[in-house]
Amino acid sequence: MKLSKLKTILPTLENVAFQLENETFVPEHFHVTEVGQITKKFIDCGGVIRTESVINFQLWNANDFEHR
């Protein structure tokens, strides 16, 4: 999904829930600490110069401190 699509969908939602790779959901008291674009420029093993861009979406919840 592109960030522009996400930005148009968010205002229409009553609730936002994030599901993790292990199929559990992020607790409802989370908040977004960072949204950013990460661009990686590199040369692959075939000598081809490539660029990749991804959006990083970082969430925080109160239980994050319990794992230290």
Image: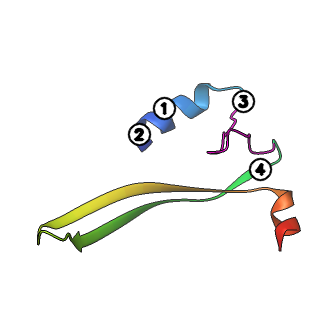
Q: Is residue 13 left or right of residue 37?
A: right
Q: Earlier in the sequence, mark 4 or mark 1?
A: 1
Compare residues 15 and 47 and report the one nearer the observer. Answer: 47
Image quarter of residue 24: top right
Compare residues 43 and 5 and report the one nearer the observer. Answer: 43
Mark 1 and 3 residues: CB-CB less than 8 Å, in contact? no
Q: Which residue is labeled 4 in the image?
A: 30
Element at label 4: loop
Looking at the image, the residue that sits furthest to the front is: 45
Task: Please check the rendered image and state whether residue 55 is part of the magenta-colored stretch, yes or no.
Answer: no
Looking at the image, is mark 2 or mark 4 nearer the viewer? 4
* Magenta segment boundaries in residue numbering: 16-27
How far apart are the two marked residues, 1 and 3, measured between alpha carbons? 15 Å
Residue 60 position (above or below residue 27): below
**What amino acid is found at the position of numbered circle 3 in the picture?**
Asn
Q: Which residue is labeled 3 in the image?
A: 15
